[in-house]
Image (cartoon, coloured by chain):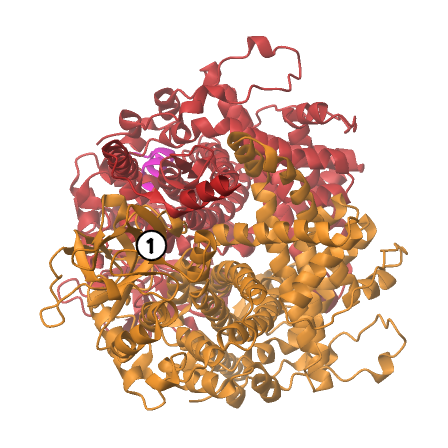
Chain colours: A red, B orange
Amino acid sequence: MTTMSDQRSDRPAGRHDAEPDRVPADGTSASKPEPRVDVDGLAAHLLGRWPDERRRARERAADPRFWKDESLSMDEHRERVLEQLRLMVADEDKQVWLAFPERLGGGDAHGANLAGFEEMVAADPSLQIKAGVQWGLFASAILHLGTPEQQDRLLPGAMDLSVPGAFAMTETGHGSDVASIATTATYDPETEEFVIHTPFRAAWKDYLGNAAVHATAATVFAQLVTKGVNHGVHCFYVPIRDPETMEFLPGVGGEDDGLKGGLRGVDNGRLHFDHVRVPRTDLLARYGSVAPDGTYSSPIESPGRRFFTMLGSLVQGRVSLDGAAIAASKIGLAIATRYGAERRQFASASPVEETVLLDYATHRRRLLPRIAEVYAAHFSHDRLLDLFDDVFSGAKDMPEQREDLETTAAALKATSTRFALDTLQECREACGGAGFLTENRITSLRADLDVYATFEGDNTVLLQLVAKRLVSDYGKHLKAATKTPAGAARFVVDQATDAALHRTGLRRFGQTIADVGDPRRAAGHLRDPETQRELLADRVAEMVEQAALALRPAQKADPETAARIFDENQVALVEAAKAHADLLRWSAFTEALETIEDPGTRRVLTWLRDVFGLTVIERNMAWYLLNGRLSAQRARTVTSYVDRLLLRLRPFAVELVDAWGYGQDHLRAKIASGAEAQRQEEARAHLARLRASGDAPVSEKALHKMGTRLRS
Amino acid sequence: MTTMSDQRSDRPAGRHDAEPDRVPADGTSASKPEPRVDVDGLAAHLLGRWPDERRRARERAADPRFWKDESLSMDEHRERVLEQLRLMVADEDKQVWLAFPERLGGGDAHGANLAGFEEMVAADPSLQIKAGVQWGLFASAILHLGTPEQQDRLLPGAMDLSVPGAFAMTETGHGSDVASIATTATYDPETEEFVIHTPFRAAWKDYLGNAAVHATAATVFAQLVTKGVNHGVHCFYVPIRDPETMEFLPGVGGEDDGLKGGLRGVDNGRLHFDHVRVPRTDLLARYGSVAPDGTYSSPIESPGRRFFTMLGSLVQGRVSLDGAAIAASKIGLAIATRYGAERRQFASASPVEETVLLDYATHRRRLLPRIAEVYAAHFSHDRLLDLFDDVFSGAKDMPEQREDLETTAAALKATSTRFALDTLQECREACGGAGFLTENRITSLRADLDVYATFEGDNTVLLQLVAKRLVSDYGKHLKAATKTPAGAARFVVDQATDAALHRTGLRRFGQTIADVGDPRRAAGHLRDPETQRELLADRVAEMVEQAALALRPAQKADPETAARIFDENQVALVEAAKAHADLLRWSAFTEALETIEDPGTRRVLTWLRDVFGLTVIERNMAWYLLNGRLSAQRARTVTSYVDRLLLRLRPFAVELVDAWGYGQDHLRAKIASGAEAQRQEEARAHLARLRASGDAPVSEKALHKMGTRLRS
């Protein structure tokens, strides 16, 4: 595997002519380190807490046997991916078993597992998702919802792929609203069996990976009914196909979801059940079990809390989609940035050379703020993995941490999957027609990533969950602590930077914005991290408070009025959740800066963090103006200061994407291979020869000009 | 063919309870017509100026023989589309020949031709684009750049598809910068031939439809060199394959572009030429010819103007992509809206029914403003077609009109193709996982439309052209007329509403914004079309003026300084061009309202126009606040007023998309077929039976509540 740092393209000539930092805030500019990017050092740093697992997963992703083959039909692609899963199981390192119990051959290593898992997207997103279905959903349901006895009995087959499985939760009629699924599992004490039944078409299980072709069993979610009482959604282990004939077992039916917009290597399908009987002991019984006589019992008394605990144990899907979406964004941006740093188009100030795309202000605006946002997303994902590992390793497994984890995962997954789609589209367009060719990878990656925005929880629904949590915490906090808006603001900051991101002790200043009217001082002010933090945090605090106040009357209203009040505030709630995610990402980026040891690299990354913070503020500028957080004068400075930062970052663009550690075997895009620079070199040599030979034609335009000059 | 209006779904119960218009601006609310949508009347109206051609093209698009078959491999898809082209030629109506001369069997009907052509996107975008390559580019080059003799000689084969052709303009090294292509055509007076030659790899022709497999000839653009002078880019008719063997002719080479992100039914490929000789008479000679002795002559003296005249004659590509992108947006929105009006998810105020998606504020915000924008885009496209037909029919073929046409086409194509991609993505996500299935059409349509954003002129480049024109016209006008900003503003408005949109005599008031502080009056003010016009037009005027002033020093600067100045203003210029497009679209929508006869329909469309105008203002709110065009108080009213309008429009959502006239055979999406409502009906009936039987289980949650109540 070659890495990008081995074959970095030459820096543009103007590299060290980057505009000097004209706005010394503290008079120390003389001692400022020379800006640079230590690519290898940064790359090593970005590998994070589980560098070995991540490196091994990347090596696998660089192995041609795991690459997406774009030429395959849907059926062939599905078989190839199943084969790839088998190769992974056969692999000595058993990386795909990391999350499972040591007693069964696993590693009990939850964070490390996800760190490796999310890198698979670089090989083929279908492979990532099919592996996710098998080990992250089907086997995970057994692991997290089953008893130790059930784990011992059912996990080995799921782990070694002798039982390919589907995760049968979603129904045609119910996606993100899992509590309302209609499949029933009714206990029959006569035979000590559950009867799994699909009462109508809308209750068919749908969009299930592995279900169309390969699965021989499924973890089926259904309303558990015993003794005339519905105890809510529980999960059952249900064999669905004869492993010999691969025919559906009696009572089981289904169909193929067929072609999809992407992920064609995953065999999504539908399942339905006609009074299918499974033994009482195949209810995955960690959070609820039924005695032979039909008596239901559960360690969690509240049915609501029980439901959310069961669902929460499956949060890793969202966590890993956040990581995979960021990895895909990196690949797209690395391709577009490398091409944009070589490709020339339209005349420039130089009479012989055309302008390099990245030297256009529009092109810098397209790509560089997205590079900054990827860094923010990367560091916040690292913190999310920490949180995930803490909870699932049991190191810090308290209800509060679980709730933090779920809220953070929801906020970040919704943000990064949306971001990935926009970014890949921007990258594709930034590469022009070449970006549309499959050989340049971006369209393929985007098509596969599309569904990340709605699976494992629809993004809009997830953002509503986040907002709900913010508002409810605001309410609790308001009661307990303070009733002033300042106190509430502090609460939100604490919430975002401390609670969710590991109580890092980031301080918050009560500083108010003084409009001093001097653009230099304004820029100095804007790049002060405390200013950025305050602007980002105040927005969350203010939006949450406004929503909380607006929603308050709903508590005592009749259902219709309550629904109307909620409806009136729904858009604002989603906006508040997005603002919360932005704050999380900004805080993680800022916190990470302190861990960058090389001073020149830290300086460049600090510019990048400023670009992230300030473009978020720029996007929401109307809010800041309307809410009196920025004066018109200062607001105008934001855009011009961002433009200056982008110009400064320009010479480091390629290095910043190289530091993500993806080599040619990961990018696999002809336009990112240096071919463009080579073509230009060839053209240049040809034109030079032509000029030297004296055979070069003179242009009619030049003759006209000469004629005009001669006549005058 | 069934149409949507035959099978419209029931209106939601609350349909006539739409919030009454609470803000009578003129005290005439009592006499206001009942809001309604006369679907059939509106649909007929929307067929526009060439209803028969459009209807016939839609009938063809509803014929299964022309549908995209998603199951085909790339090779099979390519063959199917070629076959479809043959079917179209064989068709008695010869709709594909409409633009060609009557003497050759055509219709000399340019606007009518495009009206039909752009509807093909509903059948298969690959079909539209392959037809566009054959008749809109290859044959059009002969038509517009050839002499009558050349037309007579070369058009019949291109028209009847006996000569499938490629349009060989773009090179790997040069996309939107056509003037810089490097292929040469050097005249050899000895043999009276041109020698077509590709000097290096970057000069290979690339991304050419028809070139990979089917083309036997090509219209090749190359630098015409004779007597040692390069006369710039001209077009040559070049046979490339033996029609019998389909082998490349001697000296011609090429390769297949292979798989693409979409449009897989179009065989894009590369071509290169090694001293390929074509007769002197196969230079398409309308704008430039070479005498036997090698003397060059042209009816247009300036090489620059000659080049732009040649390119301008091929503007129809951009015009038709605008239409096709709007049609594709309509199909996506019709699917998502019909589904959103049926699909229920999550509990509502009602204890037995879940909430219909479109009754969520977030869902209304996703879809309804886009429906409004499609109407704006539709009406502005109609005006663009008028302009196109005026120029190409010769009715009003003056340089000024040509320039207006090119600017308007560039502005609208860049806007609508971008809009289509965002809209289709939003529609796909609004349909959840179902939106990702190919059977529901949206992802397929989006993948095919992707490249519309960069072909026929990269959108960013097009917007820069528009901005350049705006700035240069501003300069001219400033000199000629007035030097006050008010005069400049008037100029821009005239430019947008009068010049480009047919001098309709729209008035403009010099009204300034008085902040009266009363939200009702503020809303009344916002829905005043003169307010909207002023806000939209002032923004264009101000942005263009700012850019013009900022660019002025570049005129007398050295090249490097000039390049830097341009770079600093590039992002703002692109924004100004977008603002111009928004104004064009708003003006066209407003103008069109006067042509809607049914008063109730006009009322609903007026709300929709207000939504379009106000969401554009909302998107750019920071600008309005920073430039003192809106007070904070009034700005806050914009969002709440838009939300009120969306609530009012909600009951008409399905009718508004039905009026676009696309039936099931155009939408071809299972989720838009009423299947969802049927599934819900079945589920409802099942639950009703269960309740009636007394066998329905009671929920544990309900028992808990009861228990609590009993204990207390």
Asked whether, in this view, residue A327 is left or right of residue A105, the answer is: right
Tell which subunit mark 1 falls on: B
Local crowd size for mark 1, using a 10 Å CA cut-off: few (<14), some (14–19), many (≥20) = many
Residue A282 x/y as whole percent: 32, 58
Q: Is residue B659 visible?
A: yes
The residue located at (56%, 38%) in the rendering is: B566
Considering depth in this image, is A501 or B563 the residue closer to the camera?
B563
Disc 1 marks which residue? Answer: B170
Considering depth in this image, is B693 or A386 the residue closer to the camera?
A386
Residue B550 x/y as whole percent: 66, 38
Asked whether, in this view, residue A584 is left or right of residue A15, the answer is: right
Residue A56 x/y as whole percent: 26, 32
Considering depth in this image, is B547 or A480 the residue closer to the camera?
B547
Indicate yes or no whether the magenta region holds residue B626: no
Which image quadrant: the N terminus of chain A? top left
Label 1: which secondary element: loop
Q: Quadrant of residue B299?
A: bottom left
Query: Looking at the image, which residue sits at the far top?
Result: A31
The residue located at (57%, 50%) in the rendering is: B468
Indicate yes or no whether the magenta region holds residue A115: yes
The residue located at (64%, 54%) in the rendering is: B473
Q: Is residue B536 visible?
A: no
Q: Total label count?
A: 1
Q: Quadrant of residue A113?
A: top left
Q: Which residues are magenta?
A: A107-117
Residue A427 x/y as whole percent: 42, 46
Three-letter amino acid code of the residue under disc 1: Thr
Q: Quadrant of residue A693?
A: top left
